[in-house]
Amino acid sequence: MTTSLIQEEELMEWSGFKRRTALVNWLRQCGIPYLLGNHGRVCVTAESVNLPLLHIQRVLADSSDDIF
């Protein structure tokens, strides 16, 4: 199994954050697990970025509006 790593530069580019502390705070708020590498650089896996999105999809699927 291969795991895709997303490094700090790419995270900052698509999230729009300019500072590492803002990026780390955002990752925490979103529930995205991350690691700090050499010199405190942020690194995440693609799977960890998807976790909160998958959780939201499951919650929405479980809360059906159907009335029986």
Image (cartoon, rainbow, N blue to C red):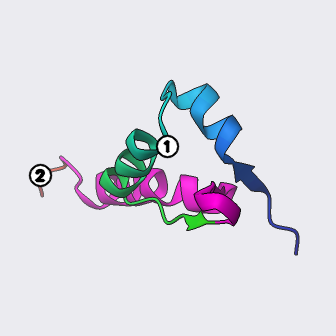
Crowd band around label 1 with a 10 angstrom C-alpha radius: few (<14), some (14–19), many (20+): some
Question: Where does the image place residue 49, in percent across and percent down from the top left?
Answer: 56, 53
Task: Look at 46% across and 59% down and name the residue there.
Answer: 32
Question: Where does the image place residue 18, in percent across and percent down from the top left?
Answer: 50, 27
Give the label on residue 67, or none.
2
- Please state the total of marks drawn on the protein image: 2
Question: Where does the image place residue 19, in percent across and percent down from the top left?
Answer: 47, 35
Quadrant location of the N terminus in the rendered image:
bottom right
Q: Is residue 6 magenta?
A: no
Give the label on residue 64, or none.
none
Q: Amino acid at mark 1?
A: Arg
Quadrant location of the C terminus in the rendered image:
bottom left
Q: Residue furthest bottom?
A: 1
Task: Look at 59% across and 65% down and name the residue there.
Answer: 36
Question: Where does the image place residue 3, in percent across and percent down from the top left?
Answer: 80, 66
Instruction: Find disc 1 in the rendering and name its residue.
Output: 20
Query: Mark 2 falls on what kind of element?
Result: loop
Q: Is residue 47 magenta?
A: yes
Q: Residue furthest left?
A: 67
Magenta segment boundaries in residue numbering? 37-65
